[in-house]
Image (spheres, grey):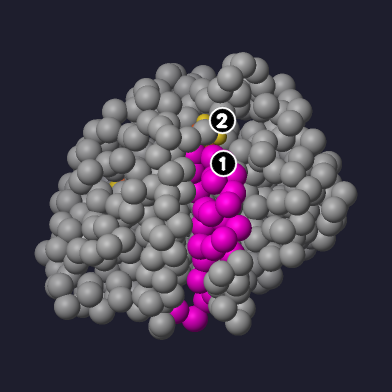
Amino acid sequence: MFYKKIISYSGKKYLYSPSMNKFIQTSEPLFEVIDSASSLSKAELLNKYFMKFDSQLIEDCLSTIDKFKHLGFFENISPHKYNYVWNEEEVNEIISSRMNSITLGITEQCNFRCKYCIYSGSFENQRIHSFKKMSLSTAKKSVEYLLDHSQKQTLPRVVCFYGGEPLLHWDLIHSIIQEYGNQNNTLQYSITTNGSLLNKEIIEFLIDNNVTLIISLDGSKEIHDRNRVLNETGKGSFDTVWGNIQMIRELSEEYYKTLLICNAVLSPPIDYSILKSFFSENKLTCMTHWVEYYGSDLVQNIKSADVKGWEKIKKEYYESYTQGVTKKEGEQFVYDLFDSFMKRIHHRDLSPLDGSNIIRRMICIPSARKLFVDATGNLSVCEKIDGNENMQIGTIDTGVDVKKVLDVMKQFKEIQSIDCYDCWLIRLCDLCHIHVVNNNNVDIAKKQFNCKLAKSFYEELLQLYVSILERNSNAFDHLKIEKTGVRLL
Ligand code: SF4
Ligand code: SF4
């Protein structure tokens, strides 16, 4: 039988069913008995629990378990039953018309040397900083590739400028936005930048063209300067970046609040209370992600003393939502931290398994939605695995090679078949190629490392989710799927 036990903050018991993607609230005896229900006979169960529960109660539990079993609640996900094989024609159809975004690695150069940067040279088979720059003609071909391959996409398409530090190649960004514009509100732009090279002229252009600006800012000066240092001097970059962020605010408070997003990399020691005060007090939208380095001491050897304030911030989110408050002045960071996950859980697909939907959903089809173009025009699955030859799926001149796409999917599926079918997170899991690829190949140890983190994180999230809904069943109704095409990187 396949389920995950969840106990809410108030002590109520739930079973989460991956096969139905639903929660069932259960009685205390059922919650306990269910673990032995499929391995013990009825007589053995009665014997095991006779001191604790009345025999009629156990009989009732068994009949309830049977009832839910027949409804498909505890069905295992069989690799044979759900062994969906994509064919070339089908993948071709999908990758030809539904793209949502293209990310252009317009330069491999950077004026920073952040200590955890994946391009620092400490990561095997990851490209390193270099002087390669994308030509205007490659950038134009890339935008046209997106426009040609998104005819059935209903969301606005997005061109994301990425680096290195993309503002080192500002002329290219400027030319592309001027030439293609917003295509009758169907094309948007975003720039992921370290924020150091912004100036008044650039900011005004970004404001005028509604360009989403994602600035890497890890928190207050003390936190940010620990890792985000300048290449030339090795000194912290906070003062420069912060000065530019203030300039944005002075030029347009509206832009500052709606299209500026801070991207904070969390590396230990982490104090969520300090992060909350900094981002919330400055009314900055923030997305956070943990420093990603499989095998790094930064993550592997983390001690609980290195992370402070996590329980407190979870409690603040819980209390806010149970009271029906979905935005509180000075608390924005709290919502930024959890809302996207709650939205993912709340809007989960509630349809039961239909034979192929698990596998179809779980494998991201390279280039179906997003595509990365490097400075020389090579196409790959994602900017996070730039430089990984096995993940290259074509060139901007020859287009995406569907055979390579199928090959990447095959590698991913093979590694999934090792333990995903037995995993309770299978319907909610958001791990993808970047969590699995290591040294140019899929790597089971890396996958299992990331799976462990994902399962323990989602266990907490599910507990938070049911605990909030228990007290306020409409708590998440306002979390709608955005109608914007902007993808946060
Ligand atoms: S700003 Fe970005 S590309 Fe540059 S060193 Fe830092 S993480 Fe790497
Ligand atoms: S957490 Fe790991 S094992 Fe579980 S579904 Fe996700 S990738 Fe598969």
Q: Categorize mark 1 by other alpha carbons within 10 Å: few (<14), some (14-19), many (20+).
A: some
Q: Residue 187: where, in percent of width, then height?
A: 55, 72
Residue 436: mark: none
On the image, the x and y values in percent for residue 135 come to 42, 52
Q: Residue at x 60, y 58 (%)?
A: 174
| Kind of residue indicated by mark 1 | Leu
Residue identified by numbered label 1: 168
Name the foreground residue: 33 vs 53.
Answer: 33
Secondary structure type for disc 2: loop
Instruction: Answer whether labels 1 and 2 touch (C-beta < 8 Å).
Output: yes
Quarter of the image containing the N terminus?
A: bottom left
Residue 191 place in picture, x, y as percent: 58, 52
Residues drawn in magenta: 153-177
For residue 282, say whether it is visible: no
The answer to whether residue 408 is magenta is: no
Mark 2 lies on residue: 111
